[in-house]
Amino acid sequence: MFCPVCRDEYRPGFTRCATCDVALVAALDDQAPAKPAPAPVLAEVAAEEATANFCGFLTLDEARHARDSVKQAGMPAEILIRDAPQPADGAPAEEEYWLRVRPKDFRAIVGIVGFEPAHSDDEDDAGVFGCAECGATVPASAETCPGCGLRFEE
């Protein structure tokens, strides 16, 4: 399968070009248009839409329940699935499920999911999160990122 715009080739089973968002075709004609410059894959995230890890869950079902409750309340939320740290005993690594939300929604979400944002034991009770722009550690009460200056809105 081929994209008629950018001419990228796809494995059987794909129906749309991931870059151009057009239907794939079985074959390309001989006179192909010049390949356009690829669109940037990552777009800038508006500060009010940037997300940060709020809390972790032991099961995917728990994370889905929390995400759905937050969305029902009208706030955006997503689940991040990643490998947990490798256990010291050599057992296979398991997955972690993190609820990601906008930092400005943290206080409201505490009432929805029933517990505080995740933070390390050596941090104060206000908690911290990682900046979605630069990855710097940011106190939950901060209005701007100390690393890149990204502004968080209340």
Image (cartoon, rainbow, N blue to C red):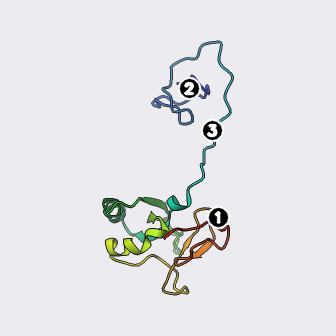
The residue positioned 53% from the left and 69% from the top of the image is 85
Q: Secondary structure at mark 2?
A: loop
* Residue drawn where x is 58% and y is 28% of the image: 9
User: Is label 1 in contact with label 2 (beta carbons under 8 Å)?
Assistant: no
- Residue closer to the observer: 114 or 142: 142
Decide if residue 150 is on the left or right side of residue 127: right
On screen, residue 99 above or below 120: above
Q: Which of the 4 image quadrants contains residue 152?
A: bottom right
**Residue under numbered circle 1:** 134
Of residues 153 and 7, the one nearer the viewer is: 153
Q: Are marks 1 and 3 in contact (CB under 8 Å)?
A: no
Disc 2 from disc 3: Cα separation: 15 Å
Q: Position of residue 104 (x, y in %)?
A: 47, 69
* Residue identified by numbered label 2: 3
Proximity of marks 2 and 3: CB atoms separated by less than 8 Å: no
Name the quadrant containing residue 36. Answer: top right
Q: Position of residue 48 (x, y in %)?
A: 51, 61
**Dot placed on the residue nearer the N-terminal end, 1 or 2:** 2
Amino acid bearing label 2: Cys
Q: Amino acid at mark 3?
A: Ala
Q: Which residue is mark 3?
A: 39
Q: Residue at x 65, y 17 (%)?
A: 32
The x and y percentages for residue 150 are 62, 66
Q: Secondary structure at mark 1?
A: loop
| Residue drawn at the location 60% of the way across and 71% of the way down | 144
